[in-house]
């Protein structure tokens, strides 16, 4: 939850103020929200986190972003490794079978064997497709959508300015600034 959330609970509290925070937390338990999606209270930590990631971050963020960006360019993206039958079978395996200190993603490495060269198969650093949001938000687009120019009801202007400033200085990830931009644009419409 801490790793995938846009803001830590204390930051949300600073953004929305004490009254809204109390009202929100009275009706929504964010820890229970993630735990219920893991759907496996007796699982080991690795499996629990895998299930939580699949049903929250992967489903609601990664797949959604991939779908939106690929459709914007008339591409159809397939994710064969997320086929529900394959995922269900892999989730049943013990955590030890899915972890290996020497090889990232050992099941995948075993499955492809020598079909991939060792340079690709044994690669330890992850790379992924990243949209240039940081560049966009620090340029002309960012000046046009600056979330400090309007006051969304319930948000504390000083906290919004602080987050936007932190982003402009390169101290926080673009996604945190984008969250405020999206909320602000929604409010202005």
Image (cartoon, rainbow, N blue to C red):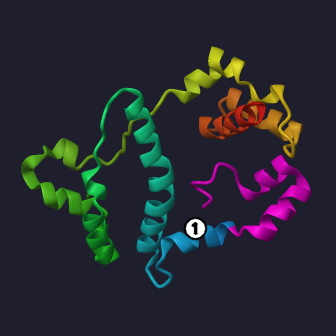
Residue at image position (84%, 40%) is 159
The percent position of residue 99, horizontal first and vertical second, equals 31, 67
| Location of residue 68 in the rendering, given as x and y in whole percent from the top left corner | 45, 37
Q: Toward the viewer: 75 or 122?
A: 75
Q: Residues within 10 Å of mark 1 (few under 14, many from 20)?
A: some
Q: Give the quarter of the image for residue 96.
A: bottom left
Question: In the displayed structure, would residue 135 be above or below residue 3?
Answer: above
Q: Residue at x 62, y 68 (%)?
A: 33
Location of residue 167 in the rendering, given as x and y in whole percent from the top left corner: 69, 32
Query: Is 70 left, or right, of 23 in this rendering?
Result: left
In the image, taking residue 140 as reference, residue 11 lies left or right, namely: right
Q: What residue sits right under mark 1 in the picture?
A: 34
Tag 1's secondary structure?
helix
Query: With 110 as the anchor, is 184 left or right in this view?
Result: right
Which quadrant of the structure image shows residue 36? bottom right
Q: Residue furthest right?
A: 19
The residue shown at (42%, 71%) is 46
Quadrant in the picture for the C terminus: top right
**Magenta segment range?**
1-29
113 vs 40, nearest the viewer: 40
Q: Is residue 15 magenta?
A: yes
- Assign the N terminus to one quadrant of the image: bottom right
Main secondary structure type of the part rendered in magenta:
helix
Residue 139 in view in this figure: no
Magenta stretch: includes residue 33 = no
């Amino acid at each position: 939850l801490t790793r995938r959330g846009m803001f830590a609970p204390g930051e949300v509290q600073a953004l929305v103020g004490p009254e809204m925070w109390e009202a929100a937390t009275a009706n929504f338990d964010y820890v229970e929200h993630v735990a219920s999606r893991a759907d496996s209270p007796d699982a080991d930590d690795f499996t629990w986190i895998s299930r939580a990631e699949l049903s929250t971050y992967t489903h609601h963020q990664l797949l959604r972003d991939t779908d939106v960006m690929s459709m914007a360019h008339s591409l159809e993206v397939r994710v064969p490794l997320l086929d529900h039958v394959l995922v269900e079978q892999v989730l049943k395996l013990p955590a030890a079978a899915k972890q290996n200190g020497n090889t990232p993603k050992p099941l995948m490495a075993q499955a492809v064997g020598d079909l991939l060269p060792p340079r690709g198969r044994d690669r330890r650093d992850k790379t992924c497709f990243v949209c240039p949001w940081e560049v966009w938000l620090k340029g002309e687009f960012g000046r046009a959508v600056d979330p400090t120019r309007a006051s969304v009801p319930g948000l504390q202007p000083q906290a919004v300015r602080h987050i936007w400033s932190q982003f402009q200085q390169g101290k926080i990830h673009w996604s945190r600034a984008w969250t405020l931009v999206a909320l602000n644009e929604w409010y202005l419409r």
